[in-house]
Image (spheres, rainbow, N blue to C red):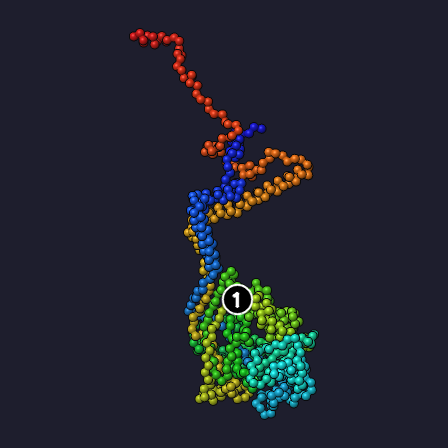
Amino acid sequence: GATAPGERITARIKRTLPVKGPQAPTLSELMRWYCLNTNTHGCRRIVVSRGRLRRFIWILLTLSAVALILWQCAELLRNYYSASVSVTVQFQKLPFPAVTICNINPYKYSSMKDYLSELDKETKKALETFYGFSEGKSKVRRSVDAWNSTGSDFFKQIPLLKFEDFSKTATDFHSGQKRKIEGSVFHKDSSIVNSGDSNDIIGFQLCDANNSSECALYTFSSGVNAIQEWYKLHYMNIMAQIPLETKEKLSYSADDLLLTCFFDGLSCDKRHFTRFHHPLHGNCYTFNSGENGTILSTSTGGSEYGLQVVLYIDEADYNPFLVTSTGAKIIVHDQNEYPFIEDIGTEIETAAATSIGMHFTRSRKLSKPYSDCTETGADIPVENLYNKSYSLQICLHSCFQKAMVDSCGCAQYAQPLPAGAEYCNYKKNPNWMYCYYRLHERFVKEQLGCQQICKDACSFKEWALTTSIAQWPSTVSEDWMLRVLSWDKGQKINKKLNKTDLANLMVFYKDLNERFISENPANTLVILLSNFGGQLGLWMSCSVVCVIEIVEVFFIDSLSIVMRRQWQKAKRWWNDRKRDQSGKPPQAGDPERQGHDNPACIDEDLPTFNTALRLPLPQDNPLPRTPPPNYSTLRLETAFTEQLPDTLEVGQH
């Protein structure tokens, strides 16, 4: 069919005009076209400048500007992920925190006699053998029957040893014989302080039940510490086998622990306390736990408007080998937090009035990408065993307990039970003590991975405590105060009160200032983009359109040119291979298509007059030119042979 004149003209212009811009045949032509047409003046000056020195200066200035842009943008990005801290102080009515109170002695020694009698016998026998300890008429609260001279399972399971001259030669507490200690591990649980007598080094040996050559040796600089640690291991083993209901009966009731109670100037009683059983501290009692849906608050600061309780400690019923101090432990915490009283509890002295002033602070941290904290703990791959809101301590303890169950086959007594697990004891898990100590050593050295997995909580509440102590009751008021307390609580206490059995506790807000510490992004997305634009405009006179242009030319167009070249090479290689296989000679006059010859370079716009004027003249077949004028045609000839009649008449006149 016939071709339209416009299409023929378009095809002729494409064959003749040089191709520029994105359809340029080479990268060098593309870069030259970009520098001549871009809005960034530095690139244009590199191309149009005359002279090598001037061109070199413009190249140096342009590269310096690019380097400054990259540096400033990197600083902007770094600052974008930073946060500023703001502190807000408010004066208002504050919710009162939960206050958990525990007796330092977890269980009444008189109630535990049947369970601990054999262990106490062996402990006293060890003290008598090596330290000359004899009870006689001493002030030990509970007497124990004559010591059993037969072999003891306690010393067979964990032999107590005394070492000589820091060597591995030790004397067995039970048999009194010296023996060589063998084992692949010699571990010192605490730093040894040499007091001048090497015989002060006491310890015990734990061996793998499945491999007797795998042993760990734990030494202590003090015999008190060694015997207490040895006693606690057997104590936990015994307590792990006692049902929870029985242990709650063996510990202190609310009537036993609490003598008087006042809050916000009003009287309170055991109904305001919730029992909480702690594995290591027995029955503890939480004031204002919020379990009934009500959280008490206070609108006035000062000691008279906080919590005031008098505690009955009953020092005479303490376990002499388990605890060596007298008093109570308390912890102030949020209603949704677990009270880790063994870690951060505050000890309360007997025969003293302890005042604890509080300052309340709420903190809020930004999560990723500003900090590595967690909102709810749902993104932490550790099961929460405490049924309370997430905290770093809950995560660490839960992680260790999970590792304990996986490695040792049973759970450690001081922490909650995972689903389907049981507490460790000798009968079912004879290897648990060795396994526990080795696992705890890895935990302390951060080799279990718990410290890497667990994160801080993004939101938390904190009560900063200020403690002061005064003698209580005073000498002049001691007599009548003890008589009144004995009279009021006669139905609970069947003996005369002693001030060393009492502790006075006051917990209150020093003021009602609530401090709120929060992190806020130092930069927003709008500020970041504005700063980027400022840097680009300052150093390169560039805008967002310029950035899009750079992306188009340096990534899209450059990539298309490179891919086009590779495709042409692959196609030429394939055609040459086909000709070689068929035996045909290479055909001449088949030039490589480049630029405007490429069928992908199609421009649908019709040519303009200006583009047509730039057409170069062909060398082979010159176009026909306009012929010169025929000057003979310019001669004047008479067009009419006869004169018209009317002209004649005019001429005659």
Left or right position of 485 against 279: left
Query: Residue at coordinates 49% horizontally, 85% vertically from top-left?
Result: 351
Q: Amino acid at mark 1?
A: Ala
Q: Position of residue 398 (x, y in %)?
A: 59, 69
Query: Residue at coordinates 55% horizontally, 70% vertically from top-left?
Result: 393
Query: Residue at coordinates 34% horizontally, 8% vertically from top-left?
Result: 648
Q: Position of residue 205 (x, y in %)?
A: 64, 79
The residue that mark 1 highlights is 457
Q: Would you identify the image quadrant in which residue 229 lies?
A: bottom right
Question: Does residue 603 lie above or below 171 as drawn?
Answer: above
Foreground of the two, 531 or 367: 531
Residue extending furthest toward the front: 52
Question: Does residue 500 lie above or below 370 as drawn?
Answer: below
Q: Position of residue 340 (x, y in %)?
A: 55, 74
Q: Position of residue 564 (x, y in %)?
A: 57, 42
Question: Does residue 159 lie above or below 137 as drawn?
Answer: above
Q: Is residue 528 visible?
A: no
Q: Is residue 631 visible?
A: yes
SS for dot 1: strand
Looking at the rendered image, the quarter that the N terminus falls into is top right
Query: Residue at coordinates 64% horizontally, 36% vertically from top-left?
Result: 586
Foreground of the two, 8 or 369: 8
Left or right position of 159 against 329: right
Question: Does residue 322 lie above or below 5 as drawn?
Answer: below
Looking at the rendered image, the quarter that the C terminus falls into is top left
Q: Would you identify the image quadrant in which residue 527 lies?
A: bottom left
Foreground of the two, 538 or 270: 538
Residue extending furthest toward the bottom: 137
